[in-house]
Image: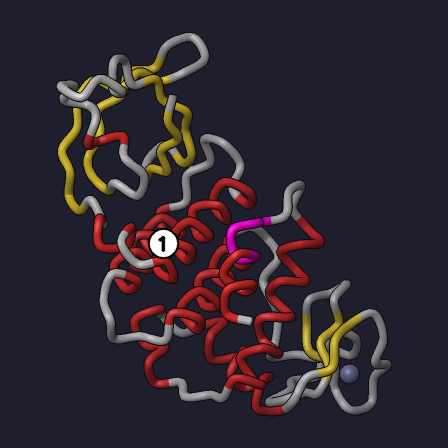
Amino acid sequence: MIWLYTEKLGKIAVIAKGAKKSKSRHLSLTLPLCYGEFVVFKGKNLYTLSEGRITNSFQGLLNNLEKLTYSTYICELIDICVTDEEDNGKLFKDFVTCLYLLNTDALDYELLIRSFELKILNATGYGLNLDNCAYCKKSINSAAYINMSFYGGVCEDCPKEYGISLSKGAYSALKYLNTAPMDKIYRLNINKTVKDEIAKITAYIINSNYSKKPKSLEMLNYIKE
Ligand SMILES: [Zn+2]
């Protein structure tokens, strides 16, 4: 049995008969990270794989520990954050774009992952509002605090509680990442401290809202330290 994340049907469980046999025409289609067109039939509870065509097998991601960990992580996020059989064309497109960008050498992967985290949070109802104060709703350009009950910035005059303080640099970077398309994040140039501030915020929201916590980044953080 494999899990497919699809544009039309959302996340589905699929039976791929005989895929483990080395001569099976289904073997390459069922490898991790394989992106392609799949024909499936719906049974009583599960789908059955009939045929498919590979668009990109993303094998380059499997040969690099950092890229492999990041791609495993975004798959894990889809698994954790998205409800079964709930289609979302935009999120699907962002997911595939993220894999393509990870497969290049041109980007800061850490920022790419933060951008994808923000996209999935927006798509699943936990998006940040960084344009208005979470309490008084007045329009804000920047802030030094994010309230984690309302997922929004807090202006100078309102209470700083139930949230996380951050630098103005982190606030503007977060604001940019929250709305910019993933292929535009190369325009953002920020240092490690600011990156860590942003990671703390997205990790907090992800870890406190879904029924499972993602695990795949732990190993990478361990290796990096
Ligand atoms: Zn306010």
Identify the residue at horizontal 47%, vertical 88% (top origin). 190
**Quadrant that contains the C terminus:** bottom right
11 sits to left or right of 211? left
Query: In the picture, residue 57 is in which quadrant?
Result: top left
Residue 35: x %, y % from top left = 24, 42
Point out residue 53 in the picture as x, y percentages from the top left corner. Answer: 13, 33
Q: Quadrant of the N terminus?
A: top left
Q: Residue 104 colored magenta?
A: no
Which residue carries the number 1 mark? 68
Residue type of the residue flagged with mark 1: Leu
Image check: 164 left or right of 110? right
Name the residue at 19% across, 32% down: 28
Is disc 1 placed on a helix, strand or loop? helix
Q: Residue at x 37, y 38 (%)?
A: 5
Near-viewer residue (44 or 35) = 35
Segment tinted magenta in the rendering: 214-218
Q: Quadrant of residue 16?
A: top left
**Magenta span has 216?**
yes
Tell me the quadrant of ligand 1.
bottom right
Q: What colour scheme was applied to this rendering of the protein?
A: secondary structure
Q: Is mark 1 within 8 Å of ligand 1?
A: no
Magenta-highlighted stretch: main secondary structure? helix
Q: Position of residue 90 (x, y in %)?
A: 37, 53
Number of dots carrying numbers? 1
Nearer to me, 180 or 97:
97
- 222 relative to 146, above or below: above
Q: Please provide percent x and percent y for residue 220.
A: 49, 61
